[in-house]
Amino acid sequence: HSNIEATDGQLRQSATNALTISGNAHSGAAGVTLTGQFGVGGAGSRVRNRIATDVAATITGDGPSVAVGSPSIRVRDLILTASDRSVVSGKVGAISIAGSFGTGGTLSVGVGLSRNDVSSHVTASIDDVEVFATGDVSLRADDQTIISSTVWAASVAASVGGSFAAGGAGIEAINNLD
């Protein structure tokens, strides 16, 4: 979103980015083995979000001209504002349940992975332009990007009657802001 206003000797230019990206993934698995068998239960979920933004509030001139001279702006106040308010989130869950009855065995594994990559560049600038202001000249660039990950994994393995059971769960959450 971009906006330029010029009223009562005041020039305001603003550029705002407010994207929202949300990735959700959940999975589940169950396995049961009977006498003399081996069973496996496994579940995994992965979410990856990527966003790249360039937010700029700029005034740029072409440089000096022989006929006109240097480009100029004459105002009371000049206000340039650029902001990025993106929200990026990943929610991941995985559950695995496995059971064994009698001789044999069971294995259960649950894995959850979340990765958010954000590249955000925010600028407010005046280039190759002379500014004549009788009041304030303000340039503001702010990045208020929010990144969040919620990741969970569970594994349950049970054995009855002389068999073995093993279970494991793992998670990874990576958030990168460039």
Image (tube, rainbow, N blue to C red):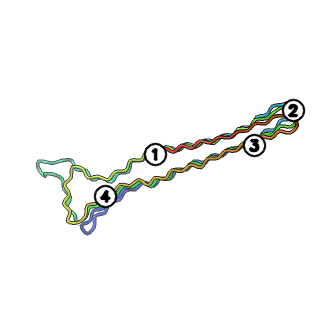
Q: Nearer the viewer, mark 1 or mark 2?
A: 2
- Residues at marks 1 and 3 touching, judged by CB atoms closer than 8 Å: no
The quarter of the picture where residue 160 lies is top right
| 62 lies left or right of 4 | left
**Label 3 belongs to which residue?**
156
Label 3 to label 2: alpha-carbon separation? 18 Å
Amino acid under disc 1 = Leu
**Label 4 belongs to which residue?**
80
Q: Quadrant of the N terminus?
A: bottom left
| 38 lies left or right of 117 | right
Amino acid under disc 4 = Leu
On the image, the x and y values in percent for residue 128 come to 21, 49
Label 1 to label 3: alpha-carbon separation? 35 Å
**Label 2 belongs to which residue?**
103
Q: Nearer the viewer, mark 2 or mark 4?
A: 2
Q: Sequence-wise, which precedes: disc 1 or disc 2?
A: 2
Residue at 81%, 33% (x, y): give it: 105
Question: Local crowd at mark 3 within 10 Å, few (<14), some, or many (≥20)?
Answer: many
